[in-house]
Image (tube, rainbow, N blue to C red):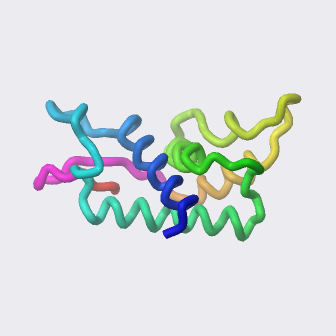
Amino acid sequence: MNTQLKTMIDGYIECAFFCDTPEDNNSEYFTYDNLSQEALSKAYKDCESFYNSMHIQNCVPNNCNWDRIGIDFWYTRNGHGTGFWDNYKDEKGYSGNDQLLTDIARNFSECYLYLGDDNKLYID
């Protein structure tokens, strides 16, 4: 796995923990170790698909922060009210690739973390 994609997935998963960790007595202690293999696979697959779409559409922002791309992908696809449009504008307020990145992310359905019977986190 390339470094850019790995960094993007890390941001994506950290954002999922921040936004959508299921309420549970131990929720503040959830880490990567609590993720099911299925959740990791889904996160990887979705991020890889988004990453490839960005390159196919030639809309990778200059000086891209791959961690931020992962975060904004989670926010945007799940309708959290923040996302690419907040972070990819120049000093004059003109958008660069934010609309195209938003459109690509919104082509993915919403997904959320949930706690399985095995006390592992899954992504629906």
Q: How many marks?
A: 0
Q: Residue at x 22, y 35 (%)?
A: 29
Q: Is residue 80 visible?
A: yes
Report the span colored magenta: 109-120
Query: Where is residue 49 shown, x and y percent of the image?
Result: 55, 67
Q: Main secondary structure of the magenta part?
A: loop
Q: Is residue 76 visible?
A: no
For this view, does 12 lie left or right of residue 96?
left
Quadrant for the C terminus, please. Answer: bottom left
Q: Residue at x 58, y 62 (%)?
A: 50
Q: Quadrant of residue 22?
A: top left
Residue lying furthest front: 3
For this view, does 70 lie left or right of residue 103?
left
Q: Quadrant of residue 100?
A: bottom right
25 in relation to 60, above or below? above
Determine if the magenta segment contains residue 113.
yes
Q: Residue at x 68, y 52 (%)?
A: 101
Q: Quadrant of residue 92?
A: top right
Q: Residue at x 27, y 64 (%)?
A: 37
For this view, does 113 lie left or right of residue 6?
left
Residue 13 or 111: which is nearer the viewer? 13
